[in-house]
Amino acid sequence: MVFPIVKLNQVLSESKVEASTADTSTRIRVRLHAKGVEKRPEMNDKAGATKYYVRRAGQFVYGRQNLHKGAFGVIPPELDGYQSSSDIPSFDVDENCLPEWIDLFLKQGGYYLELSKLASGVGSQRISPTKFLSLEMPLPSIKKQRKILDQVEFYKVSQKQLLSELTHQKTLLKKLRQQILQEAIEGKLTADWRAKKPDLEPASELLNRIAAEKAQLVKDKKIKAQKNLPSITAEEKPFQLPLGWEWCRLGEYARFERGRFSIRPRNDPTCFGGEYPFIQIGSLDSIGTIVTDYKQTLNEKGFKASKLFLMGTIMVAIVGGTIGNLGVLGKDMCFPDSMVGVQPNKTTSQDYILLLLKYFRPYVLSLSYQMAGQPNIKLPTLNNLVLALPPLLEQEAIVTKVENLLDLCDQLETQITENQSHAEQLMQAVLKEAFSHNSAAEPAATAPKATAHA
């Protein structure tokens, strides 16, 4: 079916009923991104020569500066009699055209985004009513307009319900991921595996070897002696230990070392532009992705103020808005003192330490504090985390099971994301269908005339 094509000036007539008194409590504004018209918050406007005009419910309005950003809509009944300046022109709508039809026309396919080409002016560019009213639009009968608008509204409600359900599924999936990690660190995922391995070396022996290794490193002056960590209280043991496991603090198992570079490129650019890869906090994320790319390098001067951390080092952000974010070095690199690293060794499992840091991440975030206007994590916060440590072989088994389960979660999340995309595409298809009729159709035989408000 072919719809007649009309220019907007055939269905819209600008309303210029000047307000007798300027009232700052009854002003409207038009929200961006096609979110409609609302009451403007009251402001201390200075008295001036600006004219204000009375706007009526059912009129169509747009913002001259931001029409192409979705600043348009229909004045709702509760804003009848409110005011705006000529920067938000308002139009009476012909009786043969529903105001909502024009609103839908501008929204379909993101059509309003293309209207920036109509803007003109020196400095702040605007779209004049003359240019706006020159736009062409398909105009079916009132009956057809209502039918299409009702169909679109039905799909919008259905889409909203679908997207709400998909968002709920993502929330459940996030909880499932945390529950998988919870059961992993409690030994529940490997209960059957453990039952078949009665001769596993207990974790207490592993802790003894780690302590001996640290003592030797201190003796060789490769690291500083660590302060004694506090004893673990009964209240800090939330569940019964599986056989062969041992309670300890994370600082007993993993050794955190802070990055050694505090200079920023804007402060001393002479430290940059060399052969030593250097990364910032932005390279980390919430899941501990392997980091191989870098945007900056240190020269010899910068390297003297830093340290090269080995490939496989686990990094944790401890300063800034991304605290708790993680990463694993895919090659030897340097990083600033806003991160700490756990370098790999033969005594511990880097994969298990990364799993622990993922599990503890929400808790660590809750323990952050503000300093110099941004959140921080103290090193003792990480060192003092209490965990139930499995034997080394069981750590490897846990990591494998967790990775398999989280892979399944990733697949589910991909499906949910695709469904969200399909829901958006369906809505766009509905709008496109409403306006996909022959644009070369004959114009209306008799041009409609806008009905003015008194």
Image: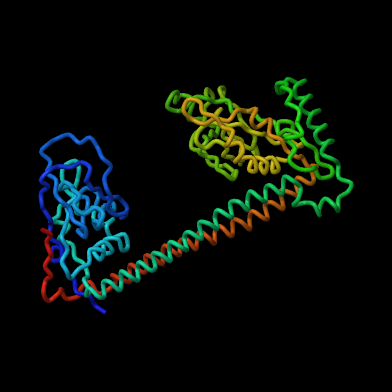
Residue found at the far bottom of this picture: 1
Residue 77, above or below 361:
below
Q: Is residue 62 visible?
A: yes
Vertical comparison of 8 with 318: above or below: below
Q: Residue at x 14, y 49 (%)?
A: 53
Q: Height in image: 442 above or below 250?
A: below
Q: Quadrant of the N terminus?
A: bottom left
- Can see residue 335? no
**Which sits in the foreground, 407 or 35?**
35
Residue at image coords 59%, 40%: 326
Q: Quadrant of residue 4?
A: bottom left
Question: In the image, 290: left or right of 397?
Answer: left
User: Quadrant of the image for the C terminus?
Assistant: bottom left
Q: How is the image coloured?
A: rainbow
Front residue (pair 201, 148): 148
Residue 431 percent coordinates (x, y) = 33, 67
Q: Residue 386 in the image: state x and y as whole percent.
A: 71, 35
| In the depicted structure, whether residue 436 falls above or below residue 198 | below
Seen as rendered, the residue at the extreme right is: 199
Whether residue 110 sits left or right of residue 126 in the image: it is: right
Quadrant of residue 158 in the image? bottom left
Image side of residue 438 versus residue 412, left or right? left
Q: Which residue is at a point 10% across and 53% down the rendered structure image?
A: 16
- Image location of residue 132, percent across then percent down: 17, 57
**Occupied quadrant, residue 378:** top right
- Tell me what residue is drawn at x 68 percent, y 55 percent: 404
